């Protein structure tokens, strides 16, 4: 097809000050497109699209914005805040089927045909040079044909593109980034065969700007380095948190052992502690009462004792008498009164617990 009289058009990127791509289209056809940058979307900050439409508005060539997905990290269909949408990885053909409703448009009806085939020469057909193919990324070329009515008029779409996927180890799991880049040729079924060669000529003549590709690759490398640094920082923070957790667990275990030892010591001390003195009596010391509990002896008040104002007497005698000199008489005769004919004063002494 002779395209020498076709009109040249370029999609300009105001952010980098370079054309993204250039193409030629027949006179009377119109081209439009846009480039958007979201710096906060460091994983995928740039997206662009373009379309070329015939004068009768029945045919067009569309270069769609790249579909970028990631998994896991959030609910399917929700943005991740870095330029991607959460979506579990799937086979390339199923993923293309998932985005087909967007490619058909909001006014399209249920497709009557949707067939997908491999596209081995996807890089040549879409002018993807070796400098744009990233090592470690898996690519799959796709070609599909879809028929569907739009506002009651049957239309045919030919979809050419590629699927990519790459997995990287993150802090707590493996992150998979994947997506699609597609071009769509479409026209009404009535005129599709007539316009098909023109649509393909426009697509084949759409060339990316190598200077823009180099600039965007540099941006990607910078973002990748920043992302790697961020991941390294997160891994270090996770390691520190893990170590802090281990230390906290160790300290908690030590505290528990200390508490258990303290409780055991307290229980032992409580068991060994002497019982308290009887309430309401000026009784003996707790220490002396504890000795009384040893058996066979009884603690009594003794003004001459050096052991807490007490002394010990047999616990088997019925009565114990004591005078002011601290002398003691122990007897089983409850009728005995040592005060008779005595030069000292004898009193019955109180025994512990009486």
Image (cartoon, rainbow, N blue to C red):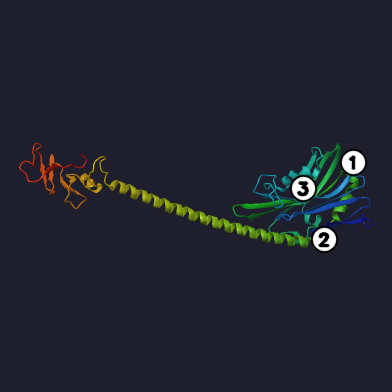
The crowd level at tag 2 (other Cα within 10 Å; few <14, some 14-19, many 20+) is: some
Circle number at residue 190 = 1
Mark 3, secondary structure of its residue: strand
Left or right, 281 with respect to 322, comes to right
User: How far across and how far down the image is residue 38, in percent?
Assistant: 75, 54
**Which circle, 3 or 1, is nearer the viewer?**
1
Q: Mark 2 sits on what residue?
A: 18
Q: Is residue 262 above or below residue 217?
A: above
User: Residue visible at 72% across and 45% down?
Assistant: 94
Q: Are marks 2 and 3 in contact (CB under 8 Å)?
A: no
Mark 3 burial class by Cα count in 10 Å: few <14, some 14-19, many 20+: few
Q: Is mark 2 on a helix, strand or loop?
A: strand
Q: How far is the residue under mark 2 from the one under mark 3?
A: 35 Å
The tag earlier along the polypeptide, 1 or 2, is 2
Q: Mark 3 points at which residue?
A: 117
| CA distance separating discs 3 and 1 | 24 Å
- Residue 267 visible in the picture: yes
CB under 8 Å between callouts 1 and 2? no
Image quadrant in which the N terminus is located: bottom right
């Amino acid at each position: 097809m002779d395209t020498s009289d076709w009109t040249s058009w370029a999609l300009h990127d105001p952010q980098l000050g370079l054309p993204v791509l250039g193409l030629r289209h027949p006179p009377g056809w119109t081209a439009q497109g846009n480039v958007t940058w979201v710096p906060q979307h460091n994983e995928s900050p740039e997206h662009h699209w373009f379309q070329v439409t015939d004068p009768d508005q029945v045919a067009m060539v569309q270069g769609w914005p790249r579909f970028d997905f990631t998994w896991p990290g959030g609910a399917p269909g929700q943005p991740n805040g870095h330029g991607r949408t959460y979506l579990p990885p799937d086979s390339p053909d199923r993923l293309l089927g998932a985005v087909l409703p967007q490619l058909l448009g909001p006014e399209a009806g249920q497709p009557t045909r949707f067939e997908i085939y491999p596209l081995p020469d996807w890089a040549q057909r879409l002018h993807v040079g070796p400098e744009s193919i990233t090592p470690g990324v898996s690519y799959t070329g796709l070609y599909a044909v879809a028929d569907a009515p739009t506002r009651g008029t049957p239309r045919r779409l030919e979809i050419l593109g590629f699927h990519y996927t790459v997995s990287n180890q993150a802090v707590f799991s493996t992150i998979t980034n994947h997506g699609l880049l597609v071009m769509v040729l479409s026209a009404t079924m009535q005129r599709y065969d007539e316009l098909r060669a023109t649509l393909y000529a426009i697509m084949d003549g759409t060339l990316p700007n190598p200077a823009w590709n180099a600039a965007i690759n540099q941006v990607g490398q910078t973002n990748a380095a920043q992302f790697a640094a961020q991941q390294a920082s997160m891994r270090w923070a996770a390691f520190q948190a893990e170590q802090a957790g281990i230390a906290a667990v160790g300290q908690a275990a030590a505290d528990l052992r200390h508490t258990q030892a303290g409780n055991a010591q307290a229980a032992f001390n409580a068991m060994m502690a002497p019982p308290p003195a009887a309430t309401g009596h000026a009784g003996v010391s707790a220490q002396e009462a504890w000795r009384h509990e040893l058996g066979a002896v009884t603690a009594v008040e003794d003004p001459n004792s050096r052991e807490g104002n007490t002394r010990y007497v047999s616990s088997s005698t019925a009565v114990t008498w004591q005078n002011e000199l601290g002398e003691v008489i122990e007897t089983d005769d409850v009728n005995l009164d040592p005060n008779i004919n005595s030069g000292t004063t004898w009193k019955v002494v109180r025994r512990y617990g009486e």
